[in-house]
Amino acid sequence: MNVEDVAAQLLGAYETGKPIAPIVEDHPEATVTDAYRIQQEQVRTWTTAGEVVKGHKVGLSSAAMQEQMGVDQPDYGHLLSGMFHLEQQPIPAGRFLQPRIEPEIAFVLGRPLAGPGVTAADAARAVEFVLPALEIVDSRIRDWKISIVDTIADNASSGGVVLGSRPTPLSAVDLRLVGCTLHLGGTLAATGAGGAVLGSPLNALVWLANTVGPLGVTLEPGHVVLPGSMTRAFPVTAGDTVQATMGELGSVTAVFT
């Protein structure tokens, strides 16, 4: 398998707006390692063009999302500067191919975090504050027919991020017990809790640091880390308004036009 060729196919899907066939159909021999190499090739293309890595996302970290996507392990992707959108401000739905939305508790780091060997205590010390967030997941793979290789190669199905504007210190909240209600157009679509994310969202941050650390990646101060969704993902389209309310963390709203 030629990593550069597959990366070019995925980059082409961004430009044409047309998803590609699952990678594993043409490359059944592809491994998770191959998939991360494809992801890194795209990140190099984006940063060369002027984008800046602003953080990472952990995907497929809840039982609900693993069941929905048919996979059995988490993955990670990169958050680039162009992926961030302001809450309550119009987000053009047409910039995405097959968007879905997920409620998450976003970590904002105040200290560097580098694995291996990161513990929950290390991770907690590195977090400056948390924010309510909505992640827009998207797939450049046709009909979301993804294996773990497909989603990793596709930058963990990243699309966009909407952060709330009320920072909360980690010491002021028990992440496991934070409840979430997700409303689409004023209708309750789902409920969830922080404990759905690997037992605690903090565990996802530990997993990420220890997974990327051996690759020479340090999670930097100011970076945003999305630990995973508290509910299943829901399709969104132009005209939709989505609000996630997370108890003492407050709420965050995304508006699609």
Image: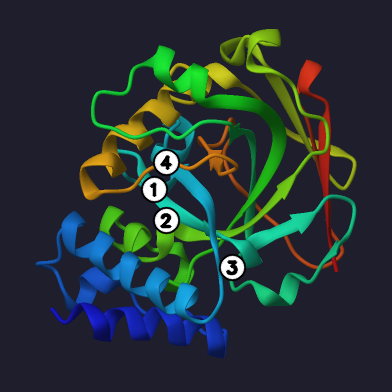
> For the residue labelled by badge 2, is the local secondary structure a helix, a strand or a loop?
helix
* 2 vs 4, front mark: 2
State if disc 2 and disc 1 touch (CB < 8 Å): yes
The disc, 1 or 4, on the residue closer to the chain's N-terminal end is 4
Q: Quadrant of the N terminus?
A: bottom left
Disc 1 to disc 2, C-alpha distance: 6 Å
Q: Position of residue 171 (x, y in %)?
A: 64, 9
State if disc 3 and disc 2 touch (CB < 8 Å): no
State if disc 3 and disc 4 touch (CB < 8 Å): no
Q: Position of residue 28 (x, y in %)?
A: 13, 68
The disc, 4 or 3, on the residue closer to the chain's N-terminal end is 4
Query: For residue 107, which numbered disc appears in the image?
Result: none
Query: For residue 98, which numbered disc appears in the image?
Result: 3
How many marks do you count on the picture?
Answer: 4
Disc 2 to disc 3, C-alpha distance: 14 Å
Query: Disc 4 designates what residue?
Result: 60
Q: Quadrant of the C terminus?
A: bottom right
> For the residue labelled by badge 1, is the local secondary structure a helix, a strand or a loop?
strand
| Left or right: residue 189 compared with residue 256 | left
The disc, 2 or 4, on the residue closer to the chain's N-terminal end is 4
The disc, 1 or 3, on the residue closer to the chain's N-terminal end is 1
* 4 vs 3, front mark: 4
* 1 vs 4, front mark: 1
Name the residue nearer the viewer: 96 or 227: 227
| Left or right: residue 244 compared with residue 193 | right
Q: Residue flagged by tag 1: what amino acid is it?
A: Tyr
Q: Which residue is painted at 35% across and 85% down in the image?
A: 8
The disc, 2 or 3, on the residue closer to the chain's N-terminal end is 3
Q: Residues within 10 Å of mark 2 (few under 14, many from 20)?
A: many
